[in-house]
Image (cartoon, rainbow, N blue to C red):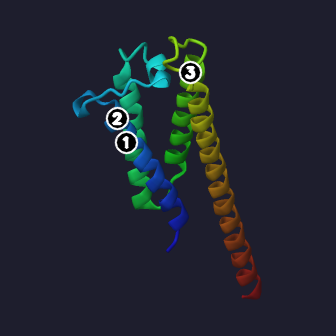
């Protein structure tokens, strides 16, 4: 199946994005009080922005899975993961007692996943460019033989 790898990647992006929406939406018993998002949203007062951004990511991933193209969804995911990592990194020195002592681990985990998503984006782009180049070369050969 064409673009199966992109669809698998986007399924992962969709799952992570949707779980963030669920975890931080007040309608589902949230928001989950995690130091990174709380740091970024002024202790949760702007959590709706965080939820909306992840919701956009879930929609982009779903549309990308249907279309078999995931560039925008993958970049959006990388942006959100790196932003999330920055939130944990910012929360780390602002610890309240022992409550957030492991924020550096979360910053590394989400930052690493953001970097992985960027790498996947550029790898997909390289593969698409290579495919287009091969098709162009094949067309040149066919025209030359005519």
Query: Is the C terminus in the top left, top right, bottom left or bottom right quadrant?
Result: bottom right
Q: Along the line of sight, which residue is nearer the eye, 125 or 104?
A: 104
Q: Residue at x 56, y 11 (%)?
A: 94
Q: Can you tell which mark lies on residue 40?
A: none
Q: Residue furthest bottom?
A: 146
Location of residue 63 with respect to 41 vertically, above or below: below
Write down the residue under mark 3: 101
User: What is the CA distance from the residue labelled 3 to the residue labelled 2?
Assistant: 21 Å
Write down the residue under mark 2: 23
Q: Residue at x 70, y 70 (%)?
A: 136
User: Where on the picture, by quarter, is residue 140?
Assistant: bottom right
Q: Residue at x 61, y 26 (%)?
A: 104
Write down the residue under mark 1: 19
SS class of the residue under badge 3? loop
Location of residue 23 with respect to 2 vertically, above or below: above
Pointers 2 and 1 in contact (C-beta within 8 Å): yes
């Amino acid at each position: 199946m064409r673009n199966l790898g992109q669809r698998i990647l986007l399924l992962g992006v969709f799952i992570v994005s949707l779980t963030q929406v669920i975890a931080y939406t007040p309608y589902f018993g949230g928001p989950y009080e995690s130091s990174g998002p709380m740091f970024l949203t002024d202790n949760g007062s702007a959590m709706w922005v965080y939820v909306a951004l992840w919701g956009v990511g879930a929609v982009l991933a779903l549309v990308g899975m249907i279309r078999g193209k995931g560039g925008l969804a993958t970049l959006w995911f990388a942006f959100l993961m790196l932003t999330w990592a920055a939130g944990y990194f910012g929360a780390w020195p602002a610890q309240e007692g022992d409550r957030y002592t492991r924020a550096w681990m979360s910053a590394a985990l989400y930052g690493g996943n953001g970097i992985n998503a960027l790498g996947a984006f550029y790898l997909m782009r390289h593969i698409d460019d290579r495919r287009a180049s091969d098709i162009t070369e094949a067309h040149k050969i066919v025209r030359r033989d005519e």
